[in-house]
Amino acid sequence: MWKWLHPYAKTERAYQLCNTLKPWFWLGALGCLSIGTVWGLLFAPADYQQGDSFRIIYIHVPAAILSMGTYVAMAVAALVGIVWQWRTAFMSMIAMAPVGALMTFIALFTGAAWGKPMWGAWWVWDARLTSELILLFLYFGVMALYAAFDDKQQAGKAAGVMALVGVVNVPIIHYSVEWWNTLHQGATISKFDNPSIAAEMLWPLLINLLGFALFIGAVTGVRLQNEIIRRERHRPWVQQLAAQNLDDKGEKHHAV
């Protein structure tokens, strides 16, 4: 069933896959974020209780959802790397970590900006906010542990174990509003049978969610390619690629 994945254990095939997907991810991210953000900020109706303050939802909610989604993807990559000893899986894991940390920071920052007019405070030690902050520290921990080892294969294993242990925090974040009495509002778009948001507000939110996901894919692809080149610079195919890029730059220079 998973045989189609096996070729991408090779760094060269993974690099080529990133080259193939990157343009589509960038174009999709640009299109979706442009449409979703303009629609949500300018054309979606104001909330009957929060007025225009609710519009931060079009940044906050996608960032919050994908901060958790990226961590789960990072943990899956760590599991694949540990079980099947795929170097590309560990490289993918560390390529995702800073992007996930950025999404977590955006979620926390926009959440604070949203919380000030709604709750009267920039920060409260609410269960949802606190567990999201722990998620940011977990991202930092994975990156720091990976950087602490000179042997990057061992670094991947150590950071992968930490990523797998930390994944227990994801369901805590998701269900915190149900398990504890918190200030944070409950689910909105995750209740697919009866979402707590009007359709004209929901569609731009879903489009932005897709746009954020494509953006994460695009940036992760770039970072993965950089990690592959850094780790595999002694390989003949990497040296050939570098020589080809130098030739292309030389031709452009002469053309100018």
Image (cartoon, rainbow, N blue to C red):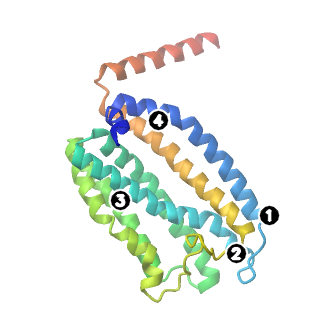
Q: Amino acid at mark 2?
A: Ser
Q: How far, Cα to Cα, is label 3 from label 4? A: 25 Å
Q: Which mark is residue 164?
A: none
* CA distance for labels 3 and 1: 37 Å
Q: Is residue 103 found left or right of 230 in the rendered image?
A: right
**42 on left or right of 133:** right
Which is nearer the N-term, disc 2 or disc 4?
4
Q: Does the rendering let one see residue 148?
A: yes
Q: Secondary structure at mark 2?
A: helix
Q: Residues within 10 Å of mark 3 (few under 14, many from 20)?
A: some
Mark closest to the chain's N terminus, 2 or 3? 2
Residue at the spot 32% in from the left edge and 69% down from the top edge: 168
Q: CA distance from mark 2 to mark 3?
A: 31 Å
Residue hosting label 2: 53
In the rendered structure, are the residues bearing label 2 and label 1 in contact, judged by CB atoms less than 8 Å apart? no
Residue at image coords 63%, 69%? 57
What is the distance, in whole Å, between disc 4 and disc 1 at their CAs?
A: 35 Å
Residue wearing tag 4: 18
* Image quarter in which the N terminus is found: top left
Q: Compared with residue 240, is residue 88 higher up or lower down, i.e. above or below? A: below
Disc on the earlier residue, 3 or 4: 4
Disc 2 versus disc 4: distance between alpha carbons?
A: 38 Å
Toward which corner of the image does residue 132 lie, by quadrant? bottom left
Picture disc at residue 43: 1
The residue under the point 56% across, 72% down is 111
Name the residue type under label 4. Cys
Please provide percent x and percent y for residue 38: 74, 57
Sequence-wise first label, 2 or 1: 1
Numbered circle sitting on residue 140: 3
